[in-house]
Amino acid sequence: MDRIRIVGGRPLVVTIAVSGAKNATLPLMIASLLTEQTLVLDNVPRLADVALLQRILGNHGVDVMVGGKRPGDSLDAGQTLHVSAARIVDTTAPYELVSKMRASFWVIAPLVARMGEAKVSLPGGCAIGTRPVDLLIMALERLGATIDIDGGYVIARAPNGLRGGEIVFPRVTVGGTHTALMAATLARGTTVIDNAACEPEIVDVANCLNRMGARISGAGGARVVVEGVAKLSGARHAVLPDRIETGTYAMAAAMTGGDLLLAGARPEHLQAALDVLTHAGARIDVSDAGVRITRNGAGLSPVDISTAPFPGFPTDLQAQLMALMTRARGTSRIRETIFENRFMHVQELARLGARIQLDGETAIIEGVERLKGAPVMATDLRASVSLVIAALAAEGETIVNRVYHLDRGFERLEDKLRRCGATIARISA
Ligand code: UD1
């Protein structure tokens, strides 16, 4: 199994190109199931999760063609996928595949909307909590699907098609909103989704669906209205830049000091995180080129924040901020309100010398003078990258084990960091 070796102490300088967003790419690929025509996706990141979803969709009969690299193309240019679900051969998504990637459960929506039936395995628990799918099921029921749960599978049926309805989410759910949107595009009549997730990835998917002929209005707000259409067509769409990758490298630059341009980043997609970084003592400059982050000399100030749905501080940057705050001058408090048990990184950060106490859903981080390198274990995607951030500022060598978690969500992480000055290398098993 691959490991990553990092020797801390080098500032990050010059430029990192931001990749396309994983959390938009996955639902966009899944949306291809809604049409028999080809969906062309540009700026797709090269990630293990994308490759895995390709396999999962392949099981339903979806053909994914990856555009080749042309001479002169830079590694930073994303890939182009031609995704074609001309003929769906199987409406079952088996446990072996869904359990590997939770988001693949979302295929249930386009499958039942287009084929009138879907049988999708319940995803099961994961490292960051129970993560149920009850609200996704509720949304499909509101659109007229009948649901049975049998042998660990959710069976959704709508033999005469879905019909528009009112969906009120009792809590904000990204997956629930994606599912409701996709299903409603092909339902007869109007669907109103209330308390919808407002994440930029929802807007990106809605924009793509509208290009495919859907009639969605209000995406990005709490109320989204969808007028169902009989059929969707193919389209071409470029995936938006990854705000979590942007925020992660911004935290890394704030951690190490230096002067780093995050090329292509969209600051309005992570304003809450940029505000926290400014408060902590980094300087943020926004231009057409992206987001530039500098921190020279001055120490870091502690913060007191809670994670929240967009536009609040994202749970997907919580671990990274915690790594940064291990070096602040004073005590920080970080409250995790979205996922229980999303503090797997705490014990590993402690191995590097961090002082963190947990009190229910709050982590209390007492900043320390220095971190010291050690072997650590990656536990989930965002937790793993928090260890990388801490290691970049730790004295001596850190070995991060189980890096497949990083490969799921960060494109060429060690390459990007090495090119801006970090001492980092992959040790292949
Ligand atoms: C998505 C993101 C993930 C991010 C999360 C929150 C993708 C591929 N993943 O995950 O990176 O951390 O949003 O921003 O886009 N919940 C229920 N019942 C449900 C569904 C969710 O109780 O049926 C709860 C969850 O347990 C959680 C909260 O709602 O506590 C939010 O989850 P949700 O927004 O649905 O997260 P995901 O879509 O799984």
Image (spheres, rainbow, N blue to C red):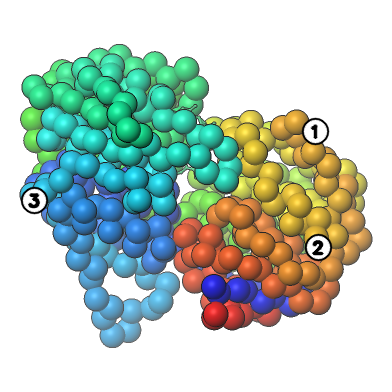
Among numbered discs 3 and 1, the one appearing first in the sequence: 3
The picture quadrant where one finds residue 55 is bottom left
- Is mark 3 in CB contact (under 8 Å) with mark 1? no
The correct choice, above or below, for 78 with respect to 310 in the image is below
Secondary structure of the residue carrying tag 3 is loop
- Indicate the position of residue 327 as horizontal and vertical percent values: 83, 56
Residue 86's tag is 3
Q: Residues within 10 Å of mark 3 (few under 14, many from 20)?
A: some
Among numbered discs 2 and 1, the one appearing first in the sequence: 2
The picture quadrant where one finds residue 106 is top left
Lateral position of residue 149 relative to residue 100, left or right:
left
Which residue is at a point 59% across and 33% down the rendered structure image? 338
In whole angstroms, how far apart are the C-alphas of marks 2 and 3? 51 Å
The correct choice, above or below, for 18 with respect to 310 in the image is below
Secondary structure of the residue carrying tag 2 is loop
Q: Which residue is mark 2?
A: 352
Q: Residues within 10 Å of mark 1 (few under 14, many from 20)?
A: few
Residue 391 seen in this snapshot: yes
- Indicate the position of residue 380 as horizontal and vertical percent values: 58, 53
Q: Which residue is mark 1?
A: 359
